[in-house]
Image (cartoon, rainbow, N blue to C red):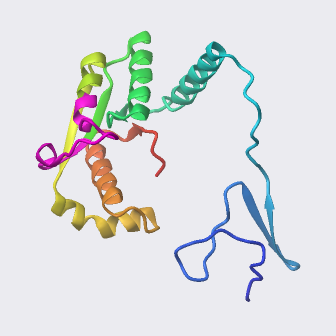
Amino acid sequence: MELDLHIHLGSCVFKNIHEVKPAHFILYNKDGIREEEYWKLESKPHTDDFENTCEHVHYLLEDAIKRQLVSDMPLCAMLSGGLDSSIITAYICNYYKENNLPKLNTYSVDYVDNDKNFVKSDFQPNSDNYYIDIMLQHFDTIHHKIVIDTPELALALKDAMIARDFPGMADVDSSMLLFCKNIRKDMTVAVSRRVF
């Protein structure tokens, strides 16, 4: 049966396959197909002062991270040295300390010869390792550095696309697949800002 696609379904990389757009649903019945939006982000004036804004952001971050700490298994954190992973690691470490829990295991990924090939820029004046080291000095986690070589990345490209079930960012996806496989050798639950 040919679908009438005048309803503006989302695009997709596969021919004649369309994705349902975020915050939408599709209803298909004997009358045909219908798309409906069930939620829409609304832009509103920001009325809080700086102090209240900071408190609110702090509360939302803390709440979102603490909700991820509920687990039957020990958990770890992915620590790239970036702002997101550093904030998550800091919150978890503080939570663990307040609750007399053991040190947090953190994991980072690096690449063979990255220290030789890294080129500074205005966007990234130092390699990730510089920022990871700052976090490790401050929070004293049990840190594990996973080092991946370029041939491994190339060999994992197909498996990464199959795991993602969608063409993605090639070497970034294979890097994440190998990184997660290495973490899985020790841990089954990893807290990260990444959506897989």
What's drawn in magenta, residue-wise? 109-132
Q: In which quarter of the image is residue 183?
A: top left
Q: Residue at x 63, y 73 (%)?
A: 18
* Quadrant location, the N terminus: bottom right
Question: Residue 19: x percent and y percent?
Answer: 63, 68
Q: Quadrant of residue 5?
A: bottom right
Front-lying residue, 114 or 95: 114
**Measured along the vertical axis of the image, is residue 168 above or below residue 107?**
below
Left or right: residue 11 versus residue 159 is: right
Farthest residue to the front: give it: 122
Question: Residue 22: x percent and y percent?
Answer: 67, 56
Front-lying residue, 81 or 154: 81
Q: Residue at x 76, y 42 (%)?
A: 42
Q: Which residue is drawn at 29% across and 49% down?
A: 179
Front-lying residue, 69 or 133: 133
Farthest residue to the bottom: give it: 1
